[in-house]
Image: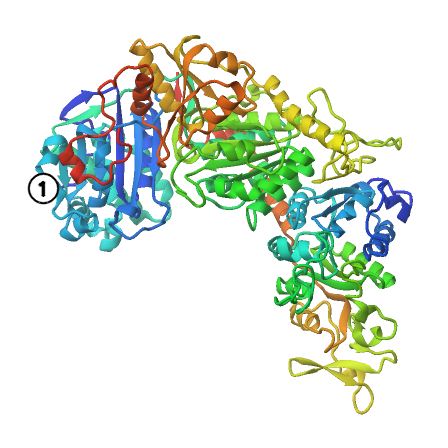
Amino acid sequence: MSTAPTALTATDFASDQDIRWCPGCGDYSILAQMKKVLPQIGVPREQIVFISGIGCSSRFPYYMNTYGMHSIHGRAPALATGLKSVRQDLQVWVITGDGDALSIGGNHFVHCIRRNVDLKIVLFNNRIYGLTKGQYSPTSPLGKVTASTPYGAIDNPLHPLSVAIGCEASFVARSIDVNVKHLGETLKRAALHKCTAFVEVYQNCNVFNDGAWDYATDKNTKFDTVIELEHGKPLIFGKNKDKGIRLNGTEPEIVDLGKGVNPDDLLFHDEKSPEPTLAYLLSRMRHPEFPEPIGVFRDVDAPKYDVELNHQIETARGKRGPGDLNALFHSGETWTVA
Amino acid sequence: MSTTTIEPNLETHKEVQQVPSATVRFAGDSGDGMQLTGDQFTRTSALVGNDVATFPDYPAEIRAPRGTLAGVSGFQVHFSSTDIYTPGDMLDALVVMNPAALKTNLTDLRKGGVLIANSDNFEKKDCEMAGYEANPLDSEVLEHTYQLYKVPMTKIVREALKDTGMGTKEIDRCKNYFALGLVYWLYGRDMQPTIRATEEKFATKPQLIEANVRALKAGWNYGETTDAFHSSYRVDKARLAPGTYKNMKGNTALAWGLMTAAHLSGKELFLGSYPITPASDILHELSKYKHFGVRTLQAEDEIAAICSAIGAAYGGHMAITTSSGPGIALKGEAIGLAIMLELPLLVINIQRGGPSTGLPTKTEQADLFQAIIGRNGESPMPVIAARSPSDCFEVAQEAWRISTRFMTPVMLLSDGYIANGSEPWMIPDISKLPKIEVKHPGPLESGEKFLPYRRDDMLSRPWALQGTKGLMYRIGGLEKQDITGNVNYEPENHQHMINTRAKKVENVASQIPLQQIEGPATGDLLVLSWGGTYGACKTAVEECLEDGLSVAHCHLRWLNPFPRNLEKILRSYKKVLVPELNMGQLRTFIRAKYLIDAQGFNKVKGRPFAVQEIANEIRKQLGLSGNGQPTREANAAVAALAGATDDGG
């Protein structure tokens, strides 16, 4: 960031490529929010890189007027780790989907989070394989009937946030494609976080899995099925803010406020808690038994691979001076032939 | 016996025989320290000015069950007063620490060679472990065929170290130094380099220094003072070209070559790697040099290893991934991505025995098909191969020069034999090495559109870096339109891009040296080789030339593309013989490309070629009989004492 850039707008972040997602796809909303949020972050376009894998969501980099790479299936976190390891000056985003991140790229996903590289990972979760035309994904629910599961899916789904928190991710959040204001705020929080920031976005595939998130987006039900997390605040939900989540031992339970239950009796959200236990518990609150939390589950600081790696380089140079090949070649046992 | 009366370096009082060269192998259980012993002998021989070549050979298991045939570990050293290019065919001296080592190594010992056995390890139980019904050291045929020395090493070392306060188990671990000391005496070697190395290694453990040095001297003294040994041998200094030398292993030379290439191109080096035999030593070596700006990432798998490297290349660094065949198979899709992205990247394959897990610690050169054509789609990439340990240093720079000039991944092939073998390396003057020029486009402020696939005269595209204003561009694995780099599915464009990527790799031939040959420019037979078989082929051809045969040697460094003048060379000989440690992979390419009826000489046993195998094949191809030198002991009685015959001559 050299001179103060003139204020950019969402349009400045749009590339010249035609967008080829299906009309009505939830991806449009995420793209729009990204273009809207990035000018607010203040990082120049040439210092932003989007890296994706394979899938509908992975077309994303083509539509951003930044640097970008549409790579191979599941490998975006590994590519981004290499890039960020050598280029700390860049802001690197990984755009992925439920199949890309959790199936073919599951290994890279967990190791990227474990290393806590300063990357922002946005997982578009539509609970289906869209690009390959409708096979079930690792987040599809049990019993899901798809092109490849005509008798219903029989493998237990993964829950992206539980996986990420299991790897002790330092930043974990969830938002919903149509909840644009919340989505924009969540992406902004991720952009500003200085470690691996992981955001799951409930994204509707209106062609192969339409309505997968209706329970969370329907005007009539969303107040009972979604609970918005706020740091330091009790977990309250419902159209009239009359229900809450209370801990009963180590189990969450839904309680009605009033009738002897005060907000102070409820579970208070603490995104800064050093232990990931609470965040994990929140990630286990699932529809239909519980309202599903959205917002930032966890936001803590932790050692970052890319920072530590470059710190080791600087420390070694400080101690030993810059490398001298000639001295290295002549170190140890040598002999001279006249 | 005394361990203090004779100081190291004292000249022997016994008869000394001068020999031009010698080949020695130390063989024992994998816990016996044979690799360390061989390594010390090599360093000492290099320091006294011999040319040296080594062949460590060890099992894949870290500790196979004690005393078994599977657990035998060996280290062979060829040291000479003349230039040598192989670790030697037949052994002049063999040290065996147990019956299993005798059984698996005996056929390699030449008739009349020195056989030293730790007789304390030939108890009934030990012999049975190796499948001997009776103690083989009692066999008359051994006495008659070789100079057999039965040395009670364990007893002597225990006696020599009894007052060190060490336990028997620890004391017994010093017996490899006794063997080393004895062989030092046998070849009149100076013990000081090993004593110094021991002092450095155990700087904080004076007891271990004392113990090892005592064992070493006890071995030397045993040779000098007992009546068993009547004479010893001397191998003079080699007349190497003037310069300062260092003994180098292939993997170390490769790592240093990569660091040198980074330096010459003004880049910092990034290695993404996943541990795999026999490539891991490159990761270990490069990890040490943080102050050179070397960044190493031990990735979660082979795919992440190469992908992280592609990410680093995309960010403008010198990017490398190292592996062996099974790992290269996993990297295939990502190599294709690098070909499509047209980014510089070195993919290094230290080949081992395959397929699948195969023979992890044994050598083979059967990944040439994989290197040249082993990916989906039309995906050409340049392929270069090292020929010897010290050659790895140059090949690394050459590979990076081509990779950056052409914006393409380059496959660099080595093998387990080169990687773990060592030879003298003349330390270069860095200021005289050719710079590797790398360019990146500057910012575009005018609003002009950047064209990431606009090509230069060699069809290479610009290496545009993030952070450069106005160049923001998107690339990916989908087929792209030439010049703009936009996604494009048009039939004509795809054909055009396929042709362009192929032509770009063909253009490499214009930037590499013309092929050289050794021997006459025309003749009856050309030996065409590549990779680690260089030394055996070169030595065999030299022998045949001395015998007056019409034969020449052509050794390829670049396997894709071939040098421009290769066809002309191949057509200048009546026959072309391609010896390979595979079933004929280079031969297949040669026949396909040039329609030349090249003949194969193929062996896939996890072992390098012996010089005599090649020399005999040359004679056979020329209609001559062998030169009468057997490569392996043919005596049936000896064969009965040895394990499964290896190369069978």
Residue type at mark 1: give it.
Asp
Query: Foreground: B326 or B42?
Result: B326
**Subunit under mark 1:** B
Give the residue pinned by disc 1.
B138
Check disc 1: other Cα within 10 Å, few if <14, some if 14-19, many if 20+. Answer: few
Q: Position of B250 compared to B80: left or right?
A: right
Query: Foreground: B637 or A32?
Result: B637
Q: Position of A300 compared to B175: left or right?
A: right
Against A189, residue A325 (above or below) is above
Q: Is residue A324 visible?
A: no
Q: Which residue lies at the image location 11% right of the left edge and 28% below the top edge? A: B230
Task: Please provide percent x and percent y for residue B286.
Answer: 52, 39
Task: Please provide percent x and percent y for residue A42.
Answer: 84, 48
Q: Which colour assignment does the render follow?
A: rainbow
Q: Quadrant of the N terminus of chain B?
A: top left
Task: Please provide percent x and percent y for residue B271.
Answer: 57, 40
Q: Position of A56 compared to B219: left or right?
A: right
Against A285, residue B130 (above or below) is above
| Residue B260 in which image quadrant | top right
Query: Foreground: B412 or B482?
Result: B482
Q: Which residue lies at the image location 83% right of the left edge and 35% below the top edge? A: B470
| Residue B517 in which image quadrant | top left
